[in-house]
């Protein structure tokens, strides 16, 4: 419990929990006030996620659902991956959430960040890598500074993802993949990153929550970038398919939140077929 929580009497906390269960709490303007309060008071991560009371709702939401699935399938540990680290802000947040979710669920969560360390690599040479919006060298990393801020929970993997992902899959020491955040934006890098779900020897939960950072907006479309990479994996791979997270907004406090459009699920159809 943080400092604020020490000064909140028990009866107020009990009243707050009852209020949050009412329909009134989910009506404007109450829901905005509740979200603000929950962002600073000590409440379970599940509640923070439900109310979007955190810096990166898709990261927390995906991690929680990965942990719940791991518990259901008796999987003791999972890997959470961010593809496209850049300045490290997202990776540090993912690390923070992984620690909190691990404390609350008991599921050990290892974090991995993949990046070139030098910004975007050379683009593929045509529209597929969005040359109208992206440039080689864009979003570089201060690797030394970031490594000093990361804990032992997190492994930063620097290099060409076309090589680092196959190396990662071959390394049997990491837990099965439970959550993926992809922010590469380019088709070619996203294509290479998604090998983590298709290469021989890959290990993953049956249903891996995923969020893609560059699929909604005027310049993004299904013929390039992350959406094209998803479509190609689905066309070429018979065992794993990536689909939108259907119905995700119907039970959210903020169903209009833009981040909900970024949520996908990688379904291990081969493992599902063998499920008892």
Image: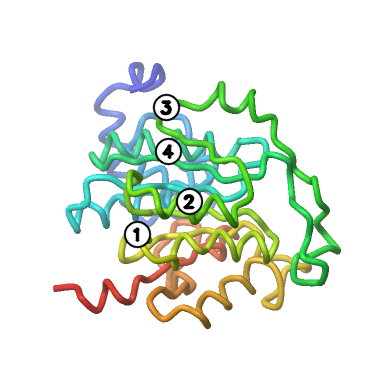
Residue 11 position by quadrant:
top left
Instruction: Mark 4 or mark 2: name the one nearer the start of the chain.
Output: 4
Q: Residues within 10 Å of mark 3 (few under 14, many from 20)?
A: few
Circle 2 Cα neighbour tier, 10 Å, few/some/many (<14 / 14–19 / ≥20): few
Residue in the foreground of this view, choosing between 270 and 66? 270
Closer-to-camera residue (174/75): 174
The quarter of the picture where residue 219 lies is bottom right
Q: Earlier in the sequence, mark 4 or mark 3?
A: 4
Say which mark, if any, is on residue 204. Answer: 1
Q: Which residue is mark 4?
A: 97
Sooner in the amino-acid sequence: mark 4 or mark 1: 4
Give how far apart the Cα atoms at labels 2 and 1 are: 16 Å
Q: Is 20 rendered above or below residue 13?
A: below
Disc 3/disc 1 C-alpha distance (Å): 22 Å
Query: Position of 215 compared to 131: left or right?
Result: left
* Residue hosting label 2: 167
Disc sitting over residue 152 in the figure: 3
Mark 3 / mark 1, whichever is N-terminal = 3
Residue 12 position (above or below residue 247): above
In this rendering, is residue 196 above or below 52? below
Which is in the foreground here, disc 4 or disc 1? 1
Q: Counting residues from the N terminus, which is met first, the one under dot 2 or under dot 1? A: 2
- Callout in the foreground (3, 2): 2
Residue 70 % position (x, y)? 25, 53
């Amino acid at each position: 419990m943080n400092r604020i929580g020490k000064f909140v009497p028990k009866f107020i906390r009990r009243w707050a929990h009852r209020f949050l269960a009412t329909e009134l709490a989910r009506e404007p303007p109450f829901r905005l006030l509740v979200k603000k309060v929950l962002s600073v008071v000590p409440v379970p991560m599940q509640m923070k996620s439900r109310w979007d009371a955190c810096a990166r709702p898709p990261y927390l939401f995906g991690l929680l659902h990965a942990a719940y699935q791991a518990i259901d399938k008796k999987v003791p540990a999972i890997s959470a991956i961010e593809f496209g680290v850049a300045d490290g802000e997202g990776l540090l947040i993912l690390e923070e959430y992984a620690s909190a979710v691990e404390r609350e669920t008991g599921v050990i969560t290892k974090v991995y960040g993949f990046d070139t360390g030098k910004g975007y690599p050379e683009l593929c040479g045509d529209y597929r890598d969005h040359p109208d919006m992206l440039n080689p060298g864009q979003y570089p990393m201060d690797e030394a500074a970031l490594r000093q801020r990361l804990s032992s929970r997190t492994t930063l993997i620097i290099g060409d993802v076309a090589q680092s992902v196959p190396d990662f899959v071959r390394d049997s020491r990491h837990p099965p993949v439970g959550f993926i955040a992809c922010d590469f934006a380019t088709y070619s890098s996203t294509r290479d990153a998604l090998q983590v779900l298709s290469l021989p020897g890959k290990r993953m939960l049956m249903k891996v929550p995923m969020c893609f950072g560059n699929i909604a907006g005027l310049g993004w479309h299904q013929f390039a970038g992350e959406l094209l990479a998803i479509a190609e994996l689905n066309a070429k791979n018979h065992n794993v398919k990536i689909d939108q997270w259907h119905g995700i907004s119907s039970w959210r406090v903020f169903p209009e939140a833009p981040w909900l459009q970024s949520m996908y699920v990688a379904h291990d159809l081969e493992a599902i077929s063998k499920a008892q």
